[in-house]
Amino acid sequence: MTTTEWAGAAAIVDGPGGYTGIEATPEWAEEVRRLARERNATLLAHNYQLPAIQDIADHVGDSLALSRIAAEAEEDTIVFCGVHFMAETAKILSPNKTVLIPDERAGCSLADSITAEQLREWKAEYPDAVVVSYVNTTAEVKGLTDICCTSSNAVDVVASIDPDREVLFLPDQFLGAHVKRVTGRENMHIWAGECHVHAGINGEELAAQARSHPDADLFVHPECGCATSALYLAGEGFVPDDKVKILSTGGMIDAARETGARQVLVATEVGMLHQLRKAAPGIDFQAVNDRASCPYMKMITPAALLRCLREGKDEVHVEPAVAERARLSVQRMIAIGNPGGGE
Ligand code: SF4
């Protein structure tokens, strides 16, 4: 089948919420695979992508794991089905490859909660501080960062810094609070950023769910606004300590395979449920908040992916000097070890 033979390809509609007009049919899947081969492209999908996008991808994972796969891939084109900062990170680690994102309008409210200009001003207030940034940041912000971190290694990264140096931690206030509590570090300043999707998962909802499912395990992603509440509830005996697991997205998949529980409550973006259900089909996974769906992630639609492969758009560019500095901050993170997953 050629592109022109497939009538569905003509129906792509561009709207404010993204590209629509194409269903994820077997014909669509066949056409996507054909175009990917033609472009010598590998398809990467983040855990929060729509199930159809996850299912067609060559690899599914968290942002850092995917960036590493991108760097090692034999193909010279990477199609990154995720949000923009993730595709930028792939470009930073693979400067000689063509990196495409199916819709460059797919942003991230957490990455947008601090601009390079704001970070410059913050650094000017604390000129001797070490800057630690979570991977949900733009390439420009990474270029002003000393060490990046993921949710799995944020504690190790902060603990590796000379205790007498001040630390600026950004942009996620909930991850920052988690790290500050675990390390007990007083000279750590936390940027008041948040992801509006994760912040929408709150402690009351979590407590109510935990009470009504007393035998369930509870998987919590540290970017969630509920991470603090989950730990508090565990301490208060509302949820047994051993039932609460604070995990990165990649860590959730491993824990799903290992848990003995028959039911698991998941406090993160709902797209994660698809991979968890595939990894452990015998377990009943339930979202703590089934409205926690990232609208940016869902902009990578079947129509957007098809358009991307047909037109070679949208290409991700990072200015070489910015990429060079940003790469150093990412490499320092990897050198500290156990970057595991982030979002
Ligand atoms: S879920 Fe939140 S942190 Fe993740 S991409 Fe969406 S807006 Fe950004």
Image: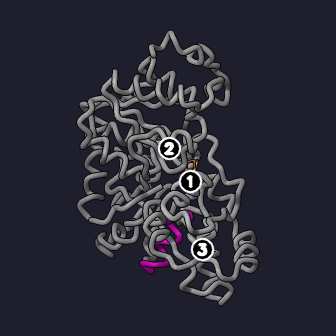
Q: Which residue is mark 3?
A: 218
What's the residue at 38%, 59% (across, down)? 149
- The residues bearing labels 1 and 3 have C-alpha atoms spaced at a distance of 17 Å
Amino acid carrying mark 2 in the image:
Gln
Give the residues drawn in magenta, as a range: 172-184
Color theme of the render: one colour
Task: Name the quadrant containing residue 100.
Answer: top left
Q: Is mark 3 within 8 Å of ligand 1?
A: no
Side of 317 relative to 106 (left or right): left
Amino acid carrying mark 1 in the image:
His
Q: Please name which of the two marks, 1 or 3, marks the residue nearer to the observer.
A: 1
Q: Earlier in the sequence, mark 3 or mark 2?
A: 2
Side of 23 relative to 78 (left or right): right
Percent coordinates x, y for residue 85 in the rendering: 45, 41
Q: Is residue 196 visible in the rendered structure shown here?
A: yes
Residue 54 numbered mark, or none = 2
